[in-house]
Image (tube, rainbow, N blue to C red):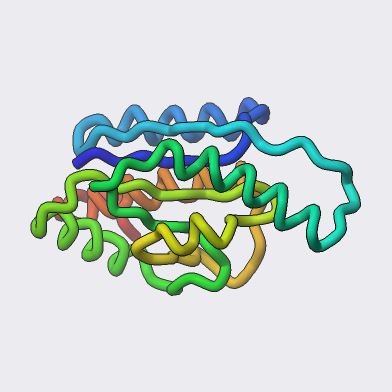
Amino acid sequence: MNISIITVGKLKEKYLKQGIEEYLKRLTAYAKVDVIEVPDEKAPEVLSELEMVQVKQKEGERILAKISQDTYVIALAIQGKLGSSEELADSLEKKATYGKSKIAFVIGGSLGLSEEVIKRSNEQLSFSRMTFPHQLMRLILVEQIYRAFRINRGEPYHK
């Protein structure tokens, strides 16, 4: 399985980088996982509604440019489907079984995802109704992908 994590912005925090690198290293036994960073759109701290939409559209264009036609897209969005780690594991297992070998998880920037990215996604997934920094979501996501593979293989780790 080939998994891409497409995300907006550069990761600066050393502790997050270290955690993500550790899980990516562990994941090599299960799947090819790439993290693709697209530049965030520079914008002032205070934005109008129109400016927010424009920022999300520009970031969305960059995201969509990284997604091939045959990729199954899972957008991380607060309004997405809530699920458990076991449900994510089951979902990934079913996708692999039914020929979905290319999967992209998409994490938007600080303003979220554009409508175009949401429309392109095959499903939307929410980890919580709470808001998390998009940089932290990278770490949470790679840990959950790792956990899903461990669950599917019946290997110890999941508690």
Above or below, 10 against 103 in this view is: above
Q: Position of residue 2 (x, y in %)?
A: 24, 38
Q: Is residue 10 left or right of residue 118?
A: right
Q: Is residue 104 left or right of residue 99?
A: right
Q: Position of residue 19 (x, y in %)?
A: 50, 34
Q: Is residue 46 left or right of residue 67?
A: right
Q: Nearer the viewer, residue 146 or 119?
A: 119
In the image, what residue occupies the spot 24% across and 47% down?
70
Q: Is residue 8 left or right of residue 54?
A: left
Q: Position of residue 131 (x, y in %)?
A: 66, 62
In the image, what residue occupies the spot 35% across and 54% down?
73
Above or below, 26 against 76 in this view is: above
Q: Nearer the viewer, residue 12 or 15?
A: 12
How many marks can you see? 0
Q: Please state, as top left, top right, bottom left or bottom right, where the C terminus lies in the image.
A: bottom left
In the image, what residue occupies the spot 66% across and 37% down?
40
Q: Please state, as top left, top right, bottom left or bottom right, where the N terminus lies in the image.
A: top left
In the image, what residue occupies the spot 72% across and 51% down?
54
